[in-house]
Amino acid sequence: WLDWLSWREEQTFEETLAKLLRAVRGKPQEDPPAPIRPIPGKRSARLQKPTAELFERMFALLHERYGEQNWWSRDNKFQLCVEAILTQGTGWKNVNAAISNLEKRATLTSQAIAELSESDLRELIRPCGRTAAKAEYIRGFAIYLGEHYGNSVERFLAEDTLTLRRKLRALKGMGQFTSDNILLYGADRPTLPINDRMRKVFFEHDLVDEVDTYDSVQQRFQNVLPFGADKIREMDAMIYRVAREHCSTPPNCDECPLAPLLSKTGPRSSRL
């Protein structure tokens, strides 16, 4: 039997529905783990199991090197959500330029964005690229807040985690990473956003494979992360620095704060 009203925090409506369909079809509750697909020219190393102790050690090494980051701290929660959309496929320098343009026009509220023409909005966020798509995503989000939450982003972000993730993912342009960024930084939920830089760092430490999906990577780490939202934000920022400063191709591990956690045979990419 399935309890549709008492989901676990990590369980989604879709997962519960999938279990019902499996029961109807006489299938086991879960598929057996899929074999890791080989990548031409590369061999897959045995992945190590992530643990709470490993993440505690990783955080301690990063914090010892970098100290407190206090990254992406915003009083304006709507601005934070806009930044999460703008940062898709671009750098912070460009995001900051676009935000500065929006500030000069006093349009960093959902009501002001909804009243802007799409052509005006595209021009204001031009530094971030993909202006037509991003303008559509931002206006759609602003209009949604106006229609359903009285332009209160705080009311929207106060929804429970499962509901908030589902509603974010239903909005155009709110993919997995963007939604998880908003959950972590805007709604203070202990959710780990997985981007390419983080995957690179975890790959070098035998924690992920190149063919792993976003959901499989996040679930693997989310279930063992011993931190609340504040520490996850700090770790996210510090891993970003590690990836930028040390995980080039080939990786430069000599001065990396995470070097003590590397396999004795060195970074993974050098072993493939």
Image (cartoon, rainbow, N blue to C red):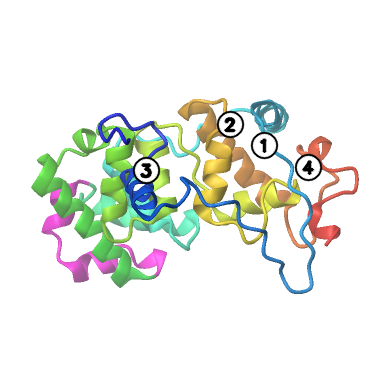
Separation of residues labelled 4 and 1 (CA atoms): 20 Å
**Residue 164 placement, left or right of 120:** right
> Given contact means CB atoms under 8 Å apart, are the residues at marks 2 and 3 in contact?
no
Tell me the kind of residue under disc 1.
Pro
Which residue matches tag 1?
Answer: 50
Sequence-earlier tag: 3 or 4: 3
Within 10 Å of the Cα at label 1, are there few (<14), some (14-19), or many (20+) other Cα atoms?
A: some
Asked if the residue under mark 1 is in contact with the one under mark 2, i.e. CB atoms within 8 Å, the reply is yes
Based on the picture, tell me whether residue 182 belongs to the magenta stretch. no
Q: Earlier in the sequence, mark 2 or mark 1?
A: 1
- Which residue in the protein does label 3 denote? 182
| Amino acid type shown at disc 2 | Val
| Secondary structure category for the residue under label 3 | helix
Between circles 4 and 1, the one closer to the viewer is: 1
> Which residues, given as a range, are shown in magenta?
109-129
| Residue type, numbered disc 3 | Ile
